[in-house]
Image (spheres, rainbow, N blue to C red):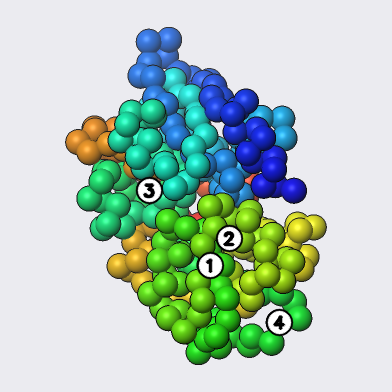
Amino acid sequence: MRISKRFALAASAAVIALFSTNAMADGEKIVIGTEGAYPPFNNLESDGSLTGFDIDIAKALCEEMKAECTFVTQDWDGIIPALIAKKFDAIVASMSITEERKQQVDFSKKYYNTPPAIVVPKDSDIKDATPEALAGKTLGAQGSTTHSNYAEAHMKDSEVKLYPTADEYKLDLGNGRIDAAIDDVVVLSEWLKTEDGACCKLLGTLPIDPVINGEGAGIAVRKGDPLADKFTQAIAAIRKSGKYQEINAKYFPFDVYGD
């Protein structure tokens, strides 16, 4: 069960060194914070390693910037406060660029953009991913995310139940304790391919709300930190070189960069 693994390993794998292969010996040292509980974007494995699209993109960006990068894991609900407290220098954790978050941190330009979606048990009587179809139902979401904000704003006739991690709402959905869940369509689609996800089906994607969903996932840094521009330049460089597309193809059969 991923929940127990997540918490059991978080302390022992608090710092995972991932040095860029082409980093200069005197290169800039950057500590990157990630959640480690949001596959296929970032996940803390049983051996203590970090894997996922976010992690591979971060490694490629560090290599492009000729920087020495280390990674630390941080629970999602405390990840921005930990950045501001200088526990790390940047967040690479599928964080959506929103106006609310821009009040606290600066962002690079996006490195991917995918829509939210709804999943339900396979035997569910819910027919489509609309507020009307979900009225009177209990909808799970990870707290302090754009997806929980979306549910609370648009699914006003549903009971929105918030969870500290995505693993926990998935467990409750699989066990019939909630009627549906909302998250990124890629996260949900990948989960449905697993043994734990065999319980459920994708009901459909939701229209992006630009105010809530923002401009896509970006890399967050402290206010005024020039790292934001450096990451933006590195994102453009790996897309031009083809490295981005190589990483994209490792995880997805479609372009997650978006429009």
Picture quadrant where residue 237 is located: top left
Q: Are marks 2 and 4 in contact (CB under 8 Å)?
A: no
Which label sits in the foreground, 3 or 1? 1
Helix, strand or loop status at disc 3: strand
Q: Which mark is residue 124?
A: 4
- Whole-Å distance between the Cαs marked 4 and 3? 35 Å
Q: CA distance from mark 3 to mark 1?
A: 26 Å
Above or below — where is 167 with respect to 227? below
Name the residue: 67% across, 47% down.
Answer: 3
Identified by mark 2, the residue type is Val
Q: Earlier in the sequence, mark 3 or mark 1?
A: 1
For the residues labelled 2 and 3, say whether their Cβ atoms are less than 8 Å apart: no
162 relative to 81 in the view: left or right: right
- SS for tag 1? strand
Q: Nearer the viewer, mark 4 or mark 3?
A: 4
Tell me if residue 112 can be seen: yes
Instruction: Find residue 218 and name its label.
Output: 3
Q: Amino acid at mark 1?
A: Lys
